Image: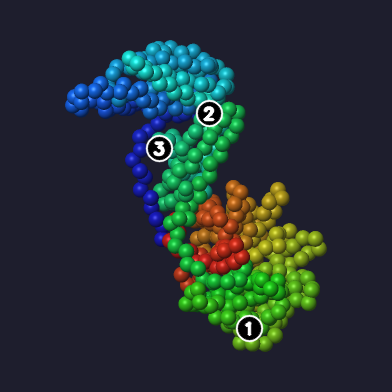
Amino acid sequence: MRVFRVPHGRSCGCFGLNGTVQAKVSAAVPLLALVLLACGGCGGGETGTKPEDRPPAINGVLLDPRRVAPGDTVAATAVAGDPEGVPLTFLWRVNSGVLLDSTSVQATWVAPSYAASCSLTVFVSDAANQTSLTSVVPVGVGTLVVESYPQGAAVYIDDELTGYVTPATITAAPAGSYSVSVEQAGFMYYPATRSALVTHGATATVMFGLNQAHMTLTQLTVSDFAFQSSWSPDGSRLACATEDDLALYRKIEIFQSPWPDYVGEYLETMDEPDWAPSWGPGDQILFASSRGGAVPRVYVVSLAGGPPDFVYPTEANFPAWSWDGEQIALVAANGAVHDLIVRPASELLPVTVAQDVVEDRPAWKPDDSQIAFSKLVGGQPYIFTVPSTGGTPEQVSHVPGTHPQWSPDGSTIAFVSSYGGTTGVWVLLMEEGPEPLDGWLTATGEDWPTWKPDTGELCFTAAASADSRTLWLAQDYPF
């Protein structure tokens, strides 16, 4: 179910054609603060003793604009007051640029025409005391890049709408700190805001993804290191490749509700290095194995019992049943590369549908018309789709990714990416526009997504502790 976000009411800022940020700060704010601070010294009765003359207080300096480019004219306002309400005098000093009106609560400063770290000092005095405050103001310009996944979000800086939409590159952005947020109808992004520091001549980049904090997570398993998993067609059981900490091999276990209590059931392939299960019709499970020390081969086994059978005669990996159970896709070795192969489940008549693919798990579209897989582009794997009868592969992800899995309604492909520096689950929103949209869903090491066929909920592996990686079920998506 799509969740719609109601945009917050926000005042509009102004971005010039050259990209310079012009934040508007009302001069009434510091003047009001000055009056309130001065009133703090009023009142009180006679005590017979002259009260102590306390020094003025400076709460800060406000700059308009808040960030300074070379040559900018800046209004600097001292937020100050005297505890006894005594009138104050002001004196400003700066180590670079030119000061105008330097003897009042608000000074005018013309910043230097070059990049610098400037010290702006205000001295505030009453009849007997003086207080000073020095602010270090960076002067320069850099570049601010704002990205969101899905793209097309409106960009806010300091809670002001800028007119930019993601991906946005704001050049000639004055040096300083920025508070950035993004917003788009139909999606919720995380985090709510990101901070960025622009320095002279440098580029600061901020990224936003879908709001994973909105999701509800249920832990399905409680032990072992979990890897690839596959649901039974009715969604009641789960086959999962797990790693035994003692034997250091992978086996295939069968889990079922009530979660996270599991039934300790294994395929009759125990004590063999098995992985990549795919649950098919009649409780048949495809899997890959390097049993006996051989190269990976693809097998099929029945939960009713009996030994596994070969599915493909030569080296192959990562098998996947079609949704109707009539075909099998797998990645087969072809010399130094791998090809995506499709063959009917009942006979050995393989068809090569894509060449030179990544040795990775493929995924069938629910109508079995297309297969998603990963393929290298410029040395990085990206998600592609191809007709299941063969044809021209089409790149559908804009960020690198592996381990695709198609949702039961055909609207979304979940995959794994480390784009942005952290591994997590991403989604391809296949029906959001003329081309799929990448969505960044999690970013704390999640892997191997799979969809629950009866409900469309998303399952993936995630660390439960330092020595355990278990299966989790996600609900309430932010898209």
- In x, y percent, where is residue 188? 43, 51
- In x, y percent, where is residue 84? 28, 23
Mark 3 surroundings: few (<14), some (14-19) or many (≥20) residues within 10 A: some
Mark closer to the observer (3, 1): 3
Disc 3 or 2, which lies upstream in sequence? 3
Mark 2 surroundings: few (<14), some (14-19) or many (≥20) residues within 10 A: many
For the question of whether residue 298 can be seen, the reply is no
Residue at image location 54% in from the left, 71% down from the top: 222
Tell which of 374 and 458 is nearer to you. Answer: 458
Quadrant holding the C terminus: bottom left
Task: Find numbered disc 3 in the image and state the secondary structure of the residue it sits on.
Answer: loop
Does the residue at mark 3 contact the one at mark 1 (Cβ under 8 Å)? no
Mark 1 surroundings: few (<14), some (14-19) or many (≥20) residues within 10 A: some
Does the residue at mark 3 contact the one at mark 2 (Cβ under 8 Å)? no
Residue, disc 2: 175
Question: What residue occupies the far front of the structure in this picture?
Answer: 48
Q: Amino acid at mark 3?
A: Asp
Q: Which mark is residue 302?
A: 1
Task: Find numbered disc 1 in the image and state the secondary structure of the residue it sits on.
Answer: strand
Residue, disc 3: 159
Q: Amino acid at mark 2?
A: Ala
- In x, y percent, where is residue 201? 60, 28
Quadrant holding the N terminus: bottom left
Disc 2 or 1, which lies upstream in sequence? 2
Is 188 rendered above or below residue 110? below
Mark closer to the observer (2, 1): 2
How many marks the image carries: the answer is 3
Is 324 rendered above or below residue 379? below
Residue at image location 49% in from the left, 13% down from the top: 98
